Image: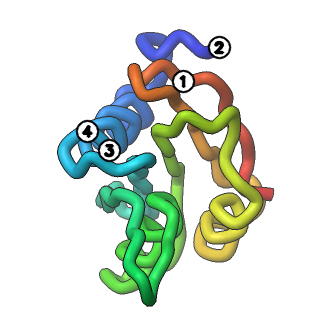
Amino acid sequence: MTDSSALDPEDRKIVTLARSARARNGVPEGAAVRDETGRTYVAGTVALDSLKLSALQTAVAMAVASGATSLEAAAVVTEADTASDADRAAVRDLGGAETPVLVAGPDGTVRTTVTAG
């Protein structure tokens, strides 16, 4: 487990934003990504009959749609133990294999940090 207070302030910010998106929208997951300019993109799980995206996939898509060319970091708030392969692939496609993905529980405590690789 990672002490969330020991996180870089910008990483703590994306974890907080991801947690807020999850709570506000009542969805299984919340996510946030930070692009190469420091802009953040926040999203929740999308579960429509015709479209299913995880929160992290949605946040990456929002970054791409807004013109981001790279990612500095990503965070997901989830009940799962780690980020899924599909989530890591989405982050990797935009940010590269070494992009950190912070995985936090619903209380905002970062459980682990993995790379998108």
Task: Residue under label 4, please give it.
Answer: 23
Locate residue 86 relative to residue 9 in the image: left or right. Answer: right
Q: Nearer the viewer, mark 3 or mark 2?
A: 3
How far apart are labels 1 and 2 at the CA level?
Answer: 6 Å
Residue type at mark 3: give it: Arg
Task: Residue under label 1, please give it.
Answer: 110
Task: Residue under label 3, please give it.
Answer: 22
4 or 2: tag closer to the N-terminus: 2
Asked if labels 3 and 4 touch by Cβ distance under 8 angstroms, the answer is yes
Residue in the image at 53% along x and 70% along y = 70
1 or 4: tag closer to the N-terminus: 4
3 or 1: tag closer to the N-terminus: 3
- Residue 9, horizontal then vertical, whole percent: 36, 27
- Residue 68, horizontal then vertical, whole percent: 41, 76
Locate residue 6 relative to residue 66 in the image: left or right. Answer: right
Task: Residue under label 2, please give it.
Answer: 1
Residue type at mark 2: give it: Met
Asked if labels 2 and 3 touch by Cβ distance under 8 angstroms, the answer is no
